[in-house]
Amino acid sequence: MGDKDVHIKLKRNMESRHLLMISLGGVIGTGLFLSSGYTIHEAGPIGTILAYGIGAIVVYLVMLCLGELSVAMPETGSFHVYADKYIGPGTGFTVAILYWLTWTVALGSEFTAAGLIMQTWFPKSPTWIWSALFMLVIFVSNALSVKFFAETEFWFSSIKVIAIIIFIILGGLAIFGAIHIKGYTHAPMFNNLFKDGIFPNGFKAVFTTMLTVNFAFSGTELIGVTAGETKDPGKNIPRAIHTTLLRLVIFFIGSIVVMAALIPWQKAGVNQSPFVLVFKSIGLPFAGDLMNFVVLTAILSAANSGLYASTRMLWSLAHEGMIPMRYAKTNSRGVPLIALSLSMLGGILALVSSVVAASTVYLILVSISGLAVVFVWMAIALSEINFRKSWLKSGHTVDELKFKTPWYPVIPWAAFIMSLLSCFLIVFDPNQRSALFYMIPFVLLCYGVYYGKEYLKKS
């Protein structure tokens, strides 16, 4: 590639702490702070804990597959590069488009949510002004340098993590009676978890909740996107994979246990954040304002990670020659500005469609992006199965791999099958069934575009 290659290279400026927080930042968002109460309300306390436990296992299995791939080949925007090499170029292209769409659609909803939160403090101000201001902040964070992006994401994520730890500690003290909580004359302990039976809405509710849980855990795979910009990927990626999942289980399941123990499941945050309900019950001053600030940083953190992920997907598509090479061009600080601007534009269009065509265009985009992550997980698992076969066939041994997916091929196949099942579980939920009807034609369209483009090239 010679001199031209200089202008499309990214810089390895991310450290282990950045990698860990970026992965946590992509996952811990409004799903935990706002929607978790609704999940408890639907599946009951034990059903929700079970659903999150199964979801965590699926994600961990996928991450073990991604670990071997991204340490052996630390590529930025890695999933589609692996899918391209080890499944087929059409799948590689489809994975990249789906993943780009996931984060771009998320950007639109996150900027709207950030504007609405600011309206609670400044009721007479229009939402769009705040949305535009936050867009500028997130764009600048990504445009300055990968080091600056990683540093802002580190601090955004730290605020969320500290809030969750305080919530679990104070909630734990309240459960055992060390702190008085309104509405209880004695320590509540764990009675609320079991008093209406293990599955008050039936076992089927666990399956429909599983879909929400999978989407709640999506973002963990960002570790793979950052691989090409990480210092010493052989050491830092495996460490981030193991610690991220452990922390997610503690944060998600720990928070759910505290909420379910302190708030009866029928009332668990249906109208407001269960975090606010618990903090208010404990008597924490300014509980609502504090949690609004935490939720705002959670939204900005997810938008920050989302813009990074969608930019790197476009860069990677151009780098692999699937779209014009100009989208891979980077500036002197190693930032692909054209890809960044295009992803930001995608986020703005998603935001506009959420206002102008919420019941048609936006609904379809949200449905496709919701399932897209599970499709990406399946591609990661299948890429790992085929990579290991190819590795051994080319004369290498398993011992040469710096990070090995344990129990091969059991873990990759389990990751693939469990992800596939969670796609089909949608059929049982009439509210989410439409996602599958939009997703299948969209995937076929992506394959059609890729192979049509290839056919035109040859003819």
Image (spheres, helix red, strand yellow):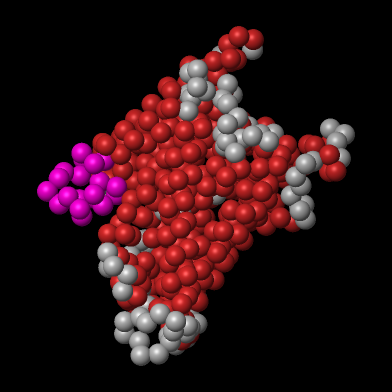
**Residue at the (35%, 80%) spot, across then down:** 181
**Residue at the (44%, 40%) spot, across then down:** 152
**Residue at the (65%, 43%) spot, across then down:** 237
**Which residues make up the magenta segment?**
113-131
**Residue at the (60%, 15%) spot, across then down:** 5
Residue 224, above or below 2: below
**Most common secondary structure along the magenta stretch:** helix
From the top left corner, tell me how far across and down residue 375 is, in percent. 54, 47
Does the magenta portion include 285? no
Residue in front for this viewpoint, 284 or 74: 284
Judge from the rendering whether residue 292 lies leftward or rightward of residue 28; answer left or right.
left
From the top left corner, tell me how far across and down residue 148 is, in percent. 47, 33
Residue in front for this viewpoint, 24 or 379: 24
Question: In the displayed image of the protein, which residue is found farthest to the left?
Answer: 124
Does the magenta portion include 115? yes
From the top left corner, tell me how far across and down residue 241 is, in percent. 63, 50
Judge from the rendering whether residue 456 lies leftward or rightward of residue 68; answer left or right.
left
Residue in front for this viewpoint, 401 or 276: 276
Residue 198, above or below 98: below
From the top left corner, tell me how far across and down residue 65 is, in percent. 68, 48
- In the rendered image, the quadrant that contains the C terminus is top right
Residue in front for this viewpoint, 112 or 437: 112
Q: Is residue 277 visible?
A: no
Question: In the displayed image of the protein, which residue is found farthest to the bottom?
Answer: 185
